[in-house]
Image: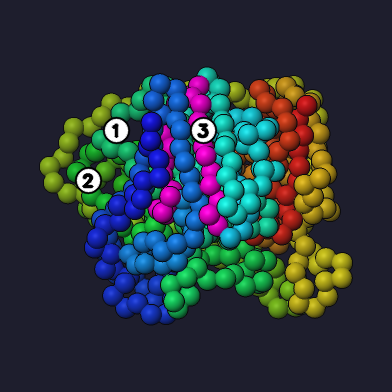
Amino acid sequence: MQPISRRGILLLGGLGVAATAVGGAGLLWGSTIRTPPGPQFAEPAELASEAGRLRVRLTAAGRRVRLGGRDVSALSFNGGIPGPTLRLKAGDRLSVRLRNALTDPTNLHVHGLHVSPEGAGDNPFVMVEPGDGFAYEYELPADHPPGVYWYHPHHHGTVADQVSGGLYGAIIVEDPEPIEAARERMLLISDVNLDGSGRIAVASPMARMLGREGEIVLVNGQVTPRLSARPGERERWRVVNTCVSRYLRLRLDGQRLQLVGIDSGRFRNPLEVEEVLLAPGNRADLLVTTRAGTASLRAAAYDRGGAGGMMGGAPAGSLSGAVLLATLAVSGDAVAELPAVSAQPTPRDLRSATVTARRELSFAMGMGAGMGGGGMMSFTINGRQFDAGRVDTTVQAGSVEEWTLVNDSPMDHPVHLHVWPMQLMEENGRDAESVLERDVVNVPARGRVVVRIAFDDFAGRSVYHCHILDHEDNGMMGVIEVR
Ligand code: C2O
Ligand code: CU
Ligand code: CU
């Protein structure tokens, strides 16, 4: 079986004229200049499991790739940005042979999958040196929640560089009962800065402190791709925010938008929405029922705070600016409407669970000791920076814990826990109205969020961290051990 190493798999529409006409400096690539229509929407290659098995070879390498309609030097899995989409079912076994053809160490993380963190599983402590490889084995439980997940490197210190360089791909865990739709689309959103010679730009210390945002915002490696449909069609859109720091307040005005779920969480009935906020790392599972006309998929501006006065007095803000992501043209003969979606499998509601332990995790930014004027800011959880050799949180397997996530800083931090999903209970004193299970929970600047976590099924060592990957690389990560 060889579904492996397919080159040039990303079917970039050959018409990438929109942003390439001018070439030259990065300026013209910025989100300020947009001339839709862009290229025809294309998706990454897909590798699907058969008879409960998927074997994949992923080679991480730096090379010339097509990105945003032109040739750039970037990082990629198997030569495509994004890497191939892995399509699985609950109960499947996924084998990934990772080969590191980069010049730095790397590894692989399957973000959001509920699998063992030990050994050759979803183990963030594995380190794969340049030239080496590693064979990962992931076993999905038979009751693994359906949804959209993703994979990316997780080697502490280089995560932001490697993910924004192009190393990411999607994972789909199929529904036990398919949701009827005219088509399914995968949209991986990323942002990047290129230098004058078409290389990924090196992020400045300031950008690493605030969390870098790229001027070029891509959907499956394309700038403002064009989608088309007929009126009345129901489409399934799976959207992944792979950006290092950019928040996406997604809108598709003029079209009917229903949210099936976020991350591994799912609503019993899809929720009618106008807007969906995806923090870095989050995914949305959406239904779009089309109406005639041309619509813009865009992200509205989101203010994720700043570090005013913390960088030697200079006010430093960070705004995820408004950006056009794609256009959807709906025309032609209308099709008959599909029946309403049947009730969906929902996660266990932990609001009535017996809580066995309560903890507080406090996320802070400050000038580290001996880091005077111009030095890097330190990013800490409960006053400590990440140390792979230290266990910060020990949890009893099978228990349900309640964590209060406190943000003592002037910026938002999207907090992520591996393996075990979190149920959002309360944000800034307001109770959650429904069961909201997710693996990245945004903790607003100077705010607090309460979550509950069921430490079911798996024991072992893993991590939690801020999913602004620059913050994680700067130390905002802790080690958890479930035993
Ligand atoms: Cu998507 Cu620990 O990361
Ligand atoms: Cu993760
Ligand atoms: Cu952060």
> Which residue bears the numbered disc 1?
181
Relative to 162, 219 lies left or right: left
Does the magenta portion include 95?
Answer: yes
Say which amino acid is labelled 1. Ala
Find residue 212 and report its horizontal and vertical position in percent: 58, 65
Query: Quick check: is the Cβ at mark 2 less than 8 Å away from ligand 1?
Result: no
Find residue 260 and report its horizontal and vertical position in percent: 43, 34
Residue at x 82% of width, y 71% of height: 371
Q: Are marks 1 and 3 in contact (CB under 8 Å)?
A: no
Find residue 414 and report its horizontal and vertical position in percent: 63, 50
Q: Which residue, as the protein is rendered here, is positioned at the far front?
A: 131
Name the disc covering residue 95, or none: 3
What is the spatial separation of the Cα atoms under label 2 and label 1, in whole angstroms? 12 Å
Find residue 412 and report its horizontal and vertical position in percent: 65, 56
> Which residue bears the numbered disc 2?
229
Residue at x 67% of width, y 33% of height: 119
The total number of labels drawn is: 3
Q: Which region is colored magenta?
A: 78-102
Nearest to viewer (mark 1 / mark 3): 3
Residue 427 visible? The answer is: no
